[in-house]
Amino acid sequence: MKTVSTNNSHGGVQGVYSHASATCNCEMTFSVFVPPQAESNPCPVLYYLSGLTCTHANVMEKGEYRAVAAKRGIIVVCPDTSPRGDDVVNEDAYFFGSGAGFYVDATEEPFAKHYNMYSYVTQELPTLIGDNFNADMDRQSIFGHSMGGHGALTIALKNPDQYKSVSAFAPICAPSGTEWGSNAFSKYLGDESTWRAYDSVSLIEDGNRLGDILVDQGTGDEFLESGLRPQLLEAACAEANIPLTLRMQDGYDHSYYFISSFMADHIAWHAERL
Amino acid sequence: MKTVSTNNSHGGVQGVYSHASATCNCEMTFSVFVPPQAESNPCPVLYYLSGLTCTHANVMEKGEYRAVAAKRGIIVVCPDTSPRGDDVVNEDAYFFGSGAGFYVDATEEPFAKHYNMYSYVTQELPTLIGDNFNADMDRQSIFGHSMGGHGALTIALKNPDQYKSVSAFAPICAPSGTEWGSNAFSKYLGDESTWRAYDSVSLIEDGNRLGDILVDQGTGDEFLESGLRPQLLEAACAEANIPLTLRMQDGYDHSYYFISSFMADHIAWHAERL
């Protein structure tokens, strides 16, 4: 693991690191905020998964998570959203390829060699965090935004024992039925029958369960009806008796101005469960 | 005044606006955060002046001021750091020209037509804010970072009746004796005798006074000795009996990771005085 940069911030250290990923077969970059409490005690780990077009840097710069994470003693880990590099097959679209890994393990060529963000986030990255930081790996939680909200929800639903809690900002709740999701899943995963394993609503319909979920969604979000569709998650959770706190935030859009506004609430949600 | 963008954030609205500036003779862009309290009552105004290379956008994205400003009911106005545009004479240097207005009124050609950030910040911009927002213009304060800390201190020292309070992150305390300052001042202002009117330490030596000052400075700041020199401000304030709270922050650098760490303290400092 290489240190790209470290900056003192809010009493802790905001770092950026890179490593040769065996899962994604390329150099991967991620950020870690280490709160001051980690100097003396192992701290719980909260993963933030970012949305389409983002890297680790967007939330690191605009997410406003450090003040509360420092107060509550939480390590915040922000991975990239896809494999990258000259060897990685890409397409010239904001919703596919670089910046759009969709947190799946691709099975189709030419994507299967690199596009394995599901295993990267759930296995390789946690091992790296446990080995290199003063982290209590028995206390991990996950959240994210948009495509990263989809990632957080599907990962938590598939690994309820690994994550103590999950939340999301404006998640893609049922990607299979959207242009974004059907385009990505058909290329990464192939046959439509395999998509259900990476679709939160389908996973709940198929019997996956977890404790409870917090979702914030702006009513002024331009992707609300075309891509996000929280009403489908609401219906699935109601049917499955999964407690969902869905907060429709008046006039908020899809940007980091929205995310940062409710970041403290989400960190508090996880802190209470970690 | 044209609206470039608005985003709901932290219960208020983060806006970006532009207008044809009569002072700078070009189109100028600035950001305004309006807290929720302004829906019912006029709110005080806090100006944030940015550092070299910055526009209005850096602090808007990375400054983490909205949570506290929304709580305390303060309008936060962030102007650009210089005139811009095809007509504006520029130099290919990060420390002069575009992004480096140094908050002076230039007297030398070819800069005098556009580089009038002092009058822009103290006169034209406040009039625009008073005319277009629910602002209590009897309650104004000012702060800034680096070159913008220099701007905030000099502007407050020269206009003690206009601003209720002043603070700075890593300000350029005595620009005349630095490479940055002597390069800029010689080109914008000409003869060295005129520089004292835009140098905080000189202004204090020459009898300018104000209530009190808060300064945060990172000990790991790469520009500490070459450009910032808080010890000179400390000595001048001691000599002049100006109460200065100078906080040397262990290991912090010159970045927004430093600024955002202490932003809440600075907003609170101003809120108590506004």
Image: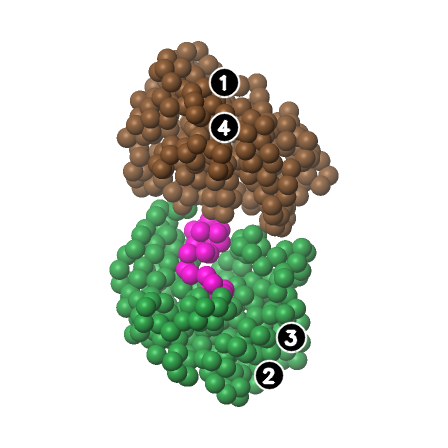
Chain colours: A green, B brown
Question: In the rendered image, which quarter contains the N terminus of chain A?
Answer: bottom left
CB within 8 Å, label 2 to label 4: no
CB within 8 Å, label 1 to label 3: no
Could you tell me which chain the residue with mark 1 belongs to? Answer: B
Residue type, mark 4 in image: His
Could you tell me which chain the residue with mark 3 belongs to? Answer: A
Residue type, mark 2 in image: Glu
Evaluate whether label 1 is on the same chain as label 2.
no
Question: Mark 4: few, some, or many residues within 10 Å (few <14, many ≥20)?
Answer: many
Name the residue: 68% across, 39% down: B38
The tag on residue A205 is 2
- For the residues labelled 2 and 4, the Cα–Cα distance comes to 64 Å
- Residue A243 in the image: x percent, y percent? 62, 72
Task: Label 2: state its secondary structure.
Answer: helix
Q: Is residue A69 magenta?
A: yes
Could you tell me which chain the residue with mark 2 belongs to? Answer: A
Q: Which residue is mark 4?
A: B114
Evaluate whether label 2 is on the same chain as label 4.
no
Task: Choose the circle earlier in sequence order: 1 or 4.
Answer: 4
* Location of residue A19 with respect to A15 vertically, above or below: below
